[in-house]
Amino acid sequence: MKTAKSGKVVRYNKWGYIFLIPFIVVYLLFQFIPLVTTIYNSFYENYRSGLTQIGPNFVGLANYKTIFTNGDMMQYAKNTLIMWVLGFIPQIIVSLLLASWFSNPSLRLKGQRFFKTVIYLPNLIMASAFAMLFFTLFSDGGPINSILIQLGILSQPFKFFSSATSSRVLVAFMNFLMWFGNTTILLMAGMMGIDTSLFEAAEVDGATSTQVFFRITMPLLRPILIYVVITSLIGGLQMFDVPQILTNGTGEPMRSTMTLIMYLNKHLFSKNYGLGGALSVVLFIITAILSFAVYNFSNKQD
Amino acid sequence: MKKKAISILLTAAMLGTMLTGCGGGGNTTAPDNASTPAPAADTNTNTDTSAPAADTNTDAAVDTADEGKVLNVYCWNDEFKRRVQAHYPGYEPDAADASKGLIGDITVQWNITPNDDNAYQNNLDETLLKQDSAAADDKIDIFLIEADYALKYVDSEYSMPLADLGVTDSDLGDQYQYTKDVVTDSNGVLKGASWQGCPGVLFYNREAAKEVLGTDDPDEVQTYVSDWNKFYETAATMADAGYDMVSTTNDTYRVYSNNVTSKWVDGTTIHIDDNIMKWVEDSKAMVDAGQTKTSDLWSDDWKRGFFPEGKVFCYFGPAWLVNFSMAADEAGSIGNMGGWGAATGPQGFFWGGTWICAATGTDNAATIKDIIMQLTANEDIMKDIVVDDDDFVNNKPAMEGMASGATMVKDENGNDVEYSSKILGGQNPLGMYCEGAGSIDLAYLSIYDQGCNEEFQAAMKNYFDGNATMDEALDLFYKAVIEKYPELTK
């Protein structure tokens, strides 16, 4: 009997590995091999000039030197961060508010299902279609300008895409609109997971709803909050589709809406795998550091 | 044992679905491949029905029996497709699929990639580099090029000499010399042909001209725009009357950039010509004085002047602008009401133009030869293009004949009349084009022109809008061009 039992355990281990095979294969093919070739490419001069291929010639760290010395990367990193923060702050505030309303049974909100669907809808629209829509709405002769002029608020059209502030705010606003529904659902799941007896106890003790929110909901929500911040930050670093389409890939005005990935796209568009690779490696390192920092922070507090 | 059986079943199910996933992919491609003979089968019925049409074909001697059954055409908009559809004898559009058509039993596959930001070139490069290894039906047969980057393809082994197709110099003897210069490689071999000539003129809004200048007569309007000083004086008058002189700063760009005295790139150094800097100076003054906008070319804000409410006095452009871009088929547009006039403008220039090239490795040489011969050397077809599409075609004697009125065209009732353009309010602009076509000088083309022109206009927009100083905008231009062409230096 004993031998039969241990035999079973071994066999289940084997099945465990077999179930892992699809993931490992996909990971190796689509993640690991591209990662290694990207790092490899970053040490080479490798681009296309017209129809002639230049390289690959080994150039050591020359690509990294170019990236760090011309100062572009810092500028685009700053743009990315500004637009992420501008979008994330309203996103987290609105999501927290909505999630606490939706998950509070004492409010007896009507039509919850409807509103939960509606706030998620913007995320279902393709980012490119959404950006095209905003581009048309806010163009110099577009409907927003006509409305503002007809209401007498403006005397002549405001060029939304010619001012760094308004273009950045538009990008941030679109990201906010697209993602606050998603965040709300995540936070709501977190809040519903909190033991209701804690809320009842607090109520019995005479805590106000503000106190309940800040003293009970927020601390217990921390793991989910941290998850939301990490994923949003990584998503923010990869911000691409909205500003790319909205500015037609130019990052105008004066490249103030050019994100790091748009910059990467510029290099890849001219088949410059050397510089593109170097930039990707730097981005990979930044993402890794950020993830570790937030992750460690969350673990230490526990 | 039960558990084991279940786990085996589950794994089998999982692997099964994975494999069906792959199998599904394989299955979907199979009908695709299988469907290529299918249209060929349809063709038999089609050729039967189109047999009477084939009789009118002036050049019915095309023997396509031993040719490939797919003609792949790479282009950046549907202009060429529309020309082939309307004017190439024996072309049958595919009612179900707009990207396909038929010539005899050959399927024409249209591959359209927009031109913007070098997207068309990048796509074409990728495919051309794979040309050798591609299956016969996937090889590019025809690709179209523009003057801005013609040299890149003409001076490569990927384009076929026209002589190898059997097109002789005398076949194209009536074409304008400049259209042949663009597609002649450094060894003097002709690699392409165009059906159109692209000398540019100034198209003005007749209503605005009457209202502000008191006349819409082309000759009199010309006196207000005959040189840049007068042009900018008129701009001030127009601004006072509530009209933008041109829709955007980019409208005058080609007029300046075609009158340069040096190339964009000298060796591998980017070089900005003085005349282009003059454009920056003049345009900035215009923007500051509120005489024009800074929107991008092709944007809705640029197009606003195609309608009377847009309040734009004029556009610069060649014949294809009127036909292809000015919304003439839309009710309420100025073009639709015949409200444009044409004047020579301050300086001659050209813009764009589409050349047909045969790709090396094509298996449809006879068909390509026939398309080139019909569209770029058949005088009757070319005259039809002028009458139907307001284009200016690449046939010197025909154009001069139609310009002077010596060559008559048929009107709707079949009567012989002198050619006139409806969009231009009955004006015959061909004389102006002829004059322009003779003086086009292409000595300063380089393979980097598209990238440089696009990036320069984009960078300077920042300067015009007041978001940057001129130096900052120039730096941005250099940066963007070097990103596009890593081999260049400032």
Image (tube, rainbow, N blue to C red):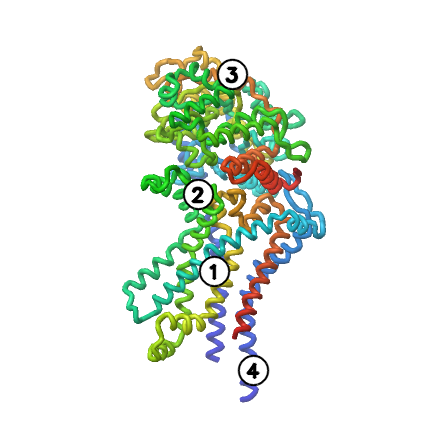
Question: Looking at the image, is B231 positioned above or below residue B284?
Answer: above
The reply to whether residue B352 is in sight is no
Q: Which mark is residue A160?
A: 2
Q: Does B76 appear above or below B18? A: above
The one of B255 and A216 positioned closer to us in this rendering: A216
Tell me the CA gap for discs 2 and 4: 70 Å
- The three-letter code of the residue at mark 1 reads Thr
Label annotation for residue B435: 3
Per the image, the residue denoted by label 4 is A7
Q: Is residue A46 above or below residue B459?
A: below
Residue at (48%, 74%) from the top-left corner? B7
Mark 2 or mark 3, whichever is nearer to me: 2
| Residue B245 image point, x, y percent | 44, 26
Same chain, labels 3 and 1: yes
Residue B381 place in picture, x, y as percent: 45, 22
Nearer to us of marks 2 and 1 is 2
**Alpha carbon of mark 2 to alpha carbon of mark 3: how far?**
43 Å
Q: Are marks 4 and 1 on the same chain?
A: no
- Residue A282: mark in rendering: none
| Secondary structure found at label 3 | helix
Identified by mark 4, the residue type is Gly
Q: Residue furthest bottom?
A: A1
Label 4 CA crowd tier, 10 Å (few <14, some 14–19, many 20+): few
Q: Secondary structure at mark 4?
A: helix
- Residue type marked 3: Glu
Question: Which corner quadrant of the image does residue B97 belong to?
Answer: top left
> Could you tell which of marks 2 and 4 lies nearer the N-terminus?
4
Nearest-to-viewer mark from 4 and 3: 3
Q: CA separation, marks 4 and 3? A: 94 Å
